[in-house]
Amino acid sequence: MNGADTAWIIVATALVLFMTLPGLALFYGGLVRGRNVLSVFMHCYAIACLMSVLWFALGYSIAFGGGTSGYWGGLDKMFLSGIDATTLAGTLPEVLFFAFQMTFAIITPALIVGAYVERIGFGFVLLFSSLWMLLCYAPVVHWVWGGGMLANGMIFEEAVMDFAGGIVVHETAGLAALILAIFLGSRKDATKPPHNPGMVMIGAAMLWVGWFGFNGGSQLAADGGAAMALTVTHLSAAAASLTWALWEKIKFGKASLVGLVTGTIAGLASITPASGFVGPVQALIIGGVAGILCQEAVNLIRNKLSIDDTLDVFAVHGVGGIFGTIMIAVFGLGSWASQLGSLVIVGVFTTVVTVALIFVCRAITPLRVDAETESLGLDLTVHGERAYELNS
């Protein structure tokens, strides 16, 4: 065990949990109507709790178990079987590696929340998130980070390069979000602006800070590689924020606060897969392009395709993660075959599993709330609480 590495990953684990609670909850909560903000908080918080237990029970073993299959890790590490405070994973206590990866298993299904807010059944959220994390996310983790088929030469001669989750986190969550939005259909009234842009900015700022643990921690060591990953993460976020705001100003005459901070998230998602491989100049290029690319993706999905991915999960996270994964090959740092091929394989797998789970889950619990519940808001009708004295 290396004490410095262990100390850093303890901090990084806290930072990645901070991304979901409270960062993502505030970011998403501020973007919805005031009558639905508590439902968003409930979704994020409940997912964090449920994914933690499921990752302990099954998820970690599926992703990082000692099975020799290239497809999944097996069940030998269920409930952390055989793991105690002295068991090592590299230079870290394995229980710490488990906890660090658990925070990724929390935020990935939590990202999907943004696609279905204001109209989805709470029971469906819990059931779908649980099954999706175990049957879609955990196997993909094994393929890419657990020595599975995309990392061990089974499929491609060179291993796929995905440092912190462009494919594993952002592509899977983004595609699942898009598919759920299509199945759900549009909200009855999708025209209202965010009820609290200040809350959105605070949440985005927390996500930015937490992302240092997300990307810097993925080095799994306290060294120069972690420092570089942290630095390029920051530069990409800054560049994307500026180009998003500039593009918005050029197109609409005004640069908005919500646009500026959405650009931040686009830059963070885009640098995630490349953060352990690129330098500062390459990070500026990735972020600068991402701010415009993801904004145009929002326009395509929302306005041209008329898909109500409520908080633009696919356009920002999905497109950003896919773009960053491709840029690794563009910069000559990874194989075109393994980068593009892995995106296709994971994309097809995610689509098939997500569609299948939607059919299964909606046969058990309603996918969408009724029209009256949607009109009155989910806070009061589903959870018996309201965020503000006067519903907005």
Image (tube, rainbow, N blue to C red):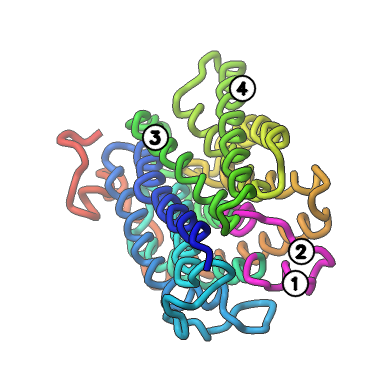
Foreground mark, 2 or 4, reads: 2
- Look at the image and give the residue range highlighted in magenta: 145-172
Identify the mark nearer the N-term, 1 or 2.
Answer: 1
Residue at image mark 4: 247
Q: Position of residue 141 (x, y in %)?
A: 60, 66
Task: Give neighbour class at mark 3: few <14, some 14-19, many 20+ (Cα, 10 Å).
Answer: many
Q: Residue at x 18, y 52 (%)?
A: 384
Q: Residue at x 75, y 72 (%)?
A: 152
Q: Position of residue 354 (x, y in %)?
A: 55, 64
- The kind of residue tagged 3 is Val
Q: Main secondary structure of the magenta part?
A: loop
Picture layout, residue 205 above or below residue 357: above
Residue at image mark 1: 152
Query: At numbered mark 4, what does the secondary structure look like: helix, strand or loop?
Result: helix
Q: Is residue 13 magenta?
A: no
Residue at image mark 3: 200
Mark 2 to mark 4 CA distance (whole Å): 36 Å
Mark 1 to mark 3 CA distance (whole Å): 41 Å
Q: Position of residue 200 (x, y in %)?
A: 39, 34
- The kind of residue tagged 4 is Trp
Q: Quadrant of residue 391?
A: top left
Residue at image mark 2: 159
